[in-house]
Image (cartoon, rainbow, N blue to C red):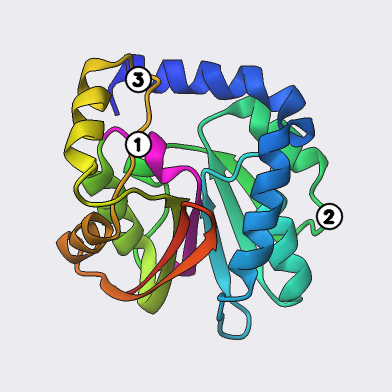
Amino acid sequence: MTNNFVKNKQKLFDRWAPSYDWLFPSVIYQAIHQRLLEYVNLPPKSNVLDMGCGTGRLLNRLAAQFPDLRGTGLDLSPQMLRIARYNNCHHPRLIYIQGQADSLPFAEAQFDAVFSTISFLHYLEPERVIGEVARVLKQDGRFYLVDITCPKYVEPYLQILHKTSNSTSIRLYSPESRQELGNSAHLQWVADYSLLGPVLLSVFSK
């Protein structure tokens, strides 16, 4: 990601962090997490990554549902991570670190699953991000991509808006574009599931 883009995103989420868990979007995110967990299938003693973890709510839910799970939360915002560490109900099974999704600070084939929940739309270089996801996934590992989607015919117009707007803008992907991104990183599309309104879960396997 470019330096200005990263700085703007970081400032945005640092400002949001103190009220993040009290705002209406957080209620929506919790409902999305609950629906997501219905489709999550993990092997015993899984090691998972939550990319764009925010205040850590999804990892706490995963750790509660899978008692032998170990998880790492990664986020750009130090203020989000401060709250995630404070709310960590499953230390030392869960840890939180600062980093960027397009240059993940992890070894190859380290995780059984990677989660991205309403964060992929923020990435400037999605091909690099999904390439990093594929790199850190173990063989047969799964990528759970949860984000707002759009129809294929709408996507070109949204891309024009994305290119002409400021550096804190977001980008939406059709189900077809998600599959193309997965293919570009040699990830196999498994299934799509509607979670809540336009929020779609796409599952990929390495």
Residue at the outermost bottom position = 44
Badge 2 element: loop
Pointer 1 residue: 123
Amino acid bearing label 1: Tyr
Pointer 2 or 1: first along the chain: 2
Residue 87 colored magenta?
no
Pointer 2 or 3: first along the chain: 3
Q: Residues within 10 Å of mark 1 (few under 14, many from 20)?
A: many
Disc marking residue 42 = none
Vertical position of residue 125 compared to residue 93: above or below? above
Q: Residues within 10 Å of mark 3 (few under 14, many from 20)?
A: some
Q: Nearer the viewer, residue 26 or 73?
A: 26
Alpha-carbon distance for marks 2 and 1? Answer: 29 Å
Q: Residues within 10 Å of mark 2 (few under 14, many from 20)?
A: some
Amino acid bearing label 3: Phe
Q: Is 149 placed left or right of 33 in the picture?
A: left
Image point (75%, 41%), residue name:
85
Task: Name the spot of residue 181 as percent of width and height, x first.
Answer: 22, 57
Q: Is 173 placed left or right of 38 in the picture?
A: left
Quarter assignment of residue 53: top right
Quarter assignment of residue 124: top left
Task: Give the magenta part as a residue range.
Answer: 110-124
Pointer 3 residue: 5
Image point (21%, 23%), residue name:
163
Image quadrant occupied by the N terminus: top left
Pointer 2 residue: 89
Query: Which mark is nearer the camera, 2 or 1?
Result: 1
